[in-house]
């Protein structure tokens, strides 16, 4: 019997309870909290805030049932507050179930999450959509999108078109069905799809929609693409978008709902056209690519690191496609592959201890230029359960075997006269909350390095 079991903790102040907790050995701390939950549930302490300190380590040590037990206990006490703050716990639970491929239990979490999509839009809802897509749960991603897009679109707390990732997922899934019906000689109803687009909230632009339908039905015309580039039009980006979706479906059997986001990653004309010769208009030098990817990362909250990680790995598919369509010469395609590899290694370092969440890349098909590294997957998995210091050591050791080409080193030293801005052709998933909420356990935005609750929240 533990010494604390003989104490009437209702007679102690919250400060005394927390002081006693901190004096316990680390492995004894959460059992003490569990004891208090069972025998002294009405103590005037911030249970949810206290649990924040332990949830991640409990999950990474495989004690997921203890986490779920706490969640159910707390929801019975204060459901409204849990709904407001649930993103910080449910995100970690979903990460775990996806990593363990426990989809039935993931669906149980989603049944609750999708009822309240607005509070966790940046830190839970958007990332979960990309987790589902990247890990190959395409139908589940569409179902999830169908469940959350309306409340997100109607919310007054979110910026305009916060629902875009979800309505886009629904739309391209319907677009693929129309394309497959066309391939099989079945009747198609383009007008119905256009009406569905409008009902989802897309712009009433019949000309662009007709361009999409033509690209679905026709072969790619290199002359038309070159003509669009020379005229300074953006039409070629939309046309190539659709042909890329078709290419990925036929070459790699990957659905539109995944390929759309891989193409969306480079849907910005301001990163192209920096190399002489229209045949290399799609080449992106290392400095421009590095700055472009960095401009899209949420470096403070890291809310979109999984999304951007997958998009960087997807660049292999995009530029293989452009090369095969004779839109990138062999010489510059080789340089592009080196630039992509450099950016991949930077992303590995950026995500660090969360690298285990990125193992979906090992289930993606390989492009013809992919160099297989048998140790890579084990490196990703070894960060699961490792603390930040250990993860950093693992990654530093792994990356020490890579040498940055001298060409890239020279390009990175060149200063761009204009900053790279996020893409403007298609909407991108950027933070969408008005006045983004800072969690009590997030790093303080003042730059002190302390948690928000221990710094400027005071």
Image (cartoon, grey):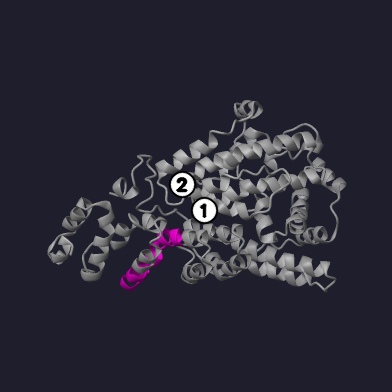
Element class at badge 1: helix
Residue 194 percent location from the top left of the image: 73, 68
Residue 222 percent location from the top left of the image: 85, 47
User: Which residue lies at the image location 45% right of the left edge and 48% below the top edge?
Assistant: 301
* Left or right of residue 310: residue 255: right
Determine the residue located farthest toward the front in the rendered image: 374
Distance from label 2 to label 1 (Cα)? Answer: 9 Å
Q: Mark 2 Cα within 10 Å, few/some/many (few <14, many 20+)?
A: many
Q: Is residue 442 above or below residue 164?
A: above
* Left or right of residue 283: residue 95: left
Whether residues under marks 2 and 1 lie with C-beta atoms below 8 angstroms apart, the answer is no
Q: Nearer the viewer, residue 244 or 337?
A: 337
Residue stretch rendered in magenta on the structure: 71-93
Residue 25 percent location from the top left of the image: 24, 52
Residue 144 inside the magenta-drawn segment: no
Residue 82 inside the magenta-drawn segment: yes
Q: Nearer the viewer, residue 307 or 454?
A: 307
Q: Main structural element of the magenta stretch: helix, strand or loop?
A: helix
> Which disc is residue 357 wearing?
1
Q: Quadrant of the N terminus?
A: bottom left
User: Which residue lies at the image location 40% right of the left edge and 46% below the top edge?
Assistant: 387
Q: Nearer the viewer, residue 335 or 424?
A: 335
> Which disc is residue 91 wearing?
none
Element class at badge 2: helix
Residue under circle 2? Answer: 353
Q: Is residue 411 above or below residue 348?
A: above
* Left or right of residue 74: residue 174: right
Picture quadrant where residue 146 is located: bottom right
Q: Mark 1 Cα within 10 Å, few/some/many (few <14, many 20+)?
A: many
Q: Nearer the viewer, residue 314 or 268?
A: 314
Residue 165 percent location from the top left of the image: 60, 59
């Amino acid at each position: 019997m533990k010494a604390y079991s003989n104490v009437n903790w209702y007679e102690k102040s919250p400060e005394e309870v927390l002081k006693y907790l901190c004096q316990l050995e680390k492995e004894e701390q959460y059992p003490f909290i569990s004891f208090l939950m069972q025998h002294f549930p009405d103590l005037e302490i911030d249970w949810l805030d206290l649990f924040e300190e332990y949830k991640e380590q409990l999950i990474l040590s495989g004690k997921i049932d203890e986490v779920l037990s706490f969640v159910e206990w707390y929801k019975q006490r204060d459901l409204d507050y849990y709904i407001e703050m649930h993103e910080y716990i449910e995100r970690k639970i979903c990460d775990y179930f996806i990593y363990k491929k426990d989809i039935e239990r993931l669906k149980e979490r989603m049944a609750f999450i999708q009822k309240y999509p607005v509070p966790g839009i940046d830190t839970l809802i958007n990332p979960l959509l990309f987790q589902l897509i990247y890990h190959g749960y395409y139908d589940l991603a569409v179902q999830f999108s169908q469940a959350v897009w309306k409340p997100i679109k109607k919310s007054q707390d979110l910026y305009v078109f916060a629902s875009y990732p979800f309505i886009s997922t629904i739309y391209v899934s319907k677009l693929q069905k129309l394309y497959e019906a066309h391939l099989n000689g079945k009747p198609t109803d383009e007008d119905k799809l256009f009406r569905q687009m409008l009902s989802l909230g897309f712009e009433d632009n019949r000309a662009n929609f007709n361009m999409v339908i033509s690209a679905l039905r026709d072969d790619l015309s290199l002359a038309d693409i070159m003509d669009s580039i020379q005229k300074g039009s953006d039409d070629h980006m939309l046309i190539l978008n659709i042909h890329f979706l078709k290419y990925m479906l036929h070459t790699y059997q990957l659905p539109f709902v995944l390929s759309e986001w891989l193409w969306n990653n480079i849907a910005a004309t301001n990163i192209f056209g920096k190399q002489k010769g229209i045949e290399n208009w799609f080449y992106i030098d290392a400095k421009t690519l590095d700055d472009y990817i960095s401009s899209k990362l949420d470096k403070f909250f890291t809310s979109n690191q999984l999304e951007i990680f997958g998009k960087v790995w997807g660049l292999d598919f995009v530029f293989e496609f452009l090369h095969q369509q004779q839109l990138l010469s062999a010489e510059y395609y080789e340089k592009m592959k080196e630039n992509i590899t450099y950016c991949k290694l930077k992303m590995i370092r950026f995500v660090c201890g969360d690298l285990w969440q990125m193992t979906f890349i090992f289930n993606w098909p390989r492009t013809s230029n992919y160099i297989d590294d048998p140790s890579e997957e084990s490196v990703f998995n070894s960060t699961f359960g490792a603390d930040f210091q250990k993860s950093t050591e693992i990654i530093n050791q792994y990356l020490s075997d890579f040498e940055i080409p001298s060409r890239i080193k020279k390009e990175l030293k060149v200063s761009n006269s204009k900053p790279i801005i996020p893409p403007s052709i298609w909407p991108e998933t950027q933070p969408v909350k008005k006045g983004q909420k800072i969690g009590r356990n997030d790093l303080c935005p003042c730059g002190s390095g302390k948690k928000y609750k221990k710094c400027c929240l005071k």
